[in-house]
Image: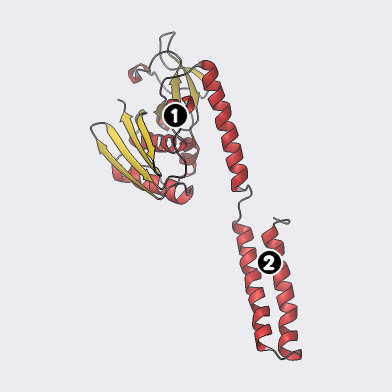
Amino acid sequence: MKNNPYRLLGIGLIIAGAIFAPAAYFMINSIPLTAIALSSVMIGFTSIALATARPHISPEASQMIFETGMENIAAFFEELELNNKAIYLPSTMRTGSAQALIPLNGDIDVQSIKGKIPGRLIVRYGDNPGNMAIAFTAPGGTILNELEIKPGPTSSEIEQVLIYVLTGLLDIANSVSVHFSEKQLHIKVTGSKLYYENIRYYRCIGSPIASIVATIASDGLEKPIRIKEETYQKGVNTIQLEVLD
């Protein structure tokens, strides 16, 4: 905070304005110059206020860290030749926060999941030797830990949380709508700033927005969820989730 440029600018403007305002009014007898000096003081206080609101890590640095992590995970998926879609599990089925599983062989029968999945990278989720999967923490899992109000089981409650997270907390979308019918959730995210790419990483776990949506919906319903389909067109993410019993 000491080297924050907004803070330094604010202090400089306040000092300069406080010194120049009396001189302009009493010595130069100029109302316009006095007004300019007082304006610099007000701008200085505004700049200091911006300094307190400025994040410790810039958006550019956050994006670089995010893209680096995504590329490393994508390379990991490519190396293992994973093609199966991830199943998002609620926090009640995990030891810790909400996570997702990508089966190493075939697909996961949720009925075979026994007890809570341990917090490891490679996990056994059933009794059979082939019930092995990769477990990873999705972006939405970290966000859920920060929420004061947890999502509920209805489409309106899930929609409210998604609106708060995507449009308010993260500011990566303009609006969100959720419709629930026949064990499927249909989500439409407009004004999306993160889009879908047809790469193995996204085919397995979905785009960042779809991953956040699936994690929050899974925790609200307290049921496993899989991203069945996702499309992106002109700033609109259309996501179809399958609720697994």
Report the side of 64 relative to 89 (left or right). Answer: right
Write the residue at 60% across / 33% down.
68
The answer to which of marks 1 and 2 sits earlier in the sequence is 2
Q: Quadrant of the C terminus?
A: top left
Label 1 crowd (10 A; few <14 / some 14-19 / many >=20): few
Q: Amino acid at mark 1?
A: Asn
> Which label is found at residue 198?
1
Q: Which residue is mark 2?
A: 10
The answer to whether any part of residue 113 appears in the image is yes
Q: Which mark is residue 45?
A: none
Instruction: Give above or below for 75 relative to 211.
Output: above
Q: Is residue 118 above or below residue 56?
A: above
Residue 174 x %, y %: 41, 50
Between 90 and 237, the one nearer to me in the picture = 237
Judged left or right of residue 46, residue 242 is left
Looking at the image, residue 173 lies above or below residue 113 = below
Q: Which amino acid type corresponds to the residue marked 2 in the rendered image?
A: Gly
Identify the image quadrant of the N terminus: bottom right
Q: In the structure shown, which secondary structural element does the residue marked by tag 1 occupy?
A: loop
Residue at image location 68% in from the left, 79% down from the top = 37
Q: Residue at x 49, y 16 (%)?
A: 81
Crowd rating for badge 2 (residues with CA inside 10 Å; few <14, some 14–19, many 20+): many
The residue nearer to you, when weighing 27 against 159, is 27
Which dot, 1 or 2, sits closer to the camera? 1
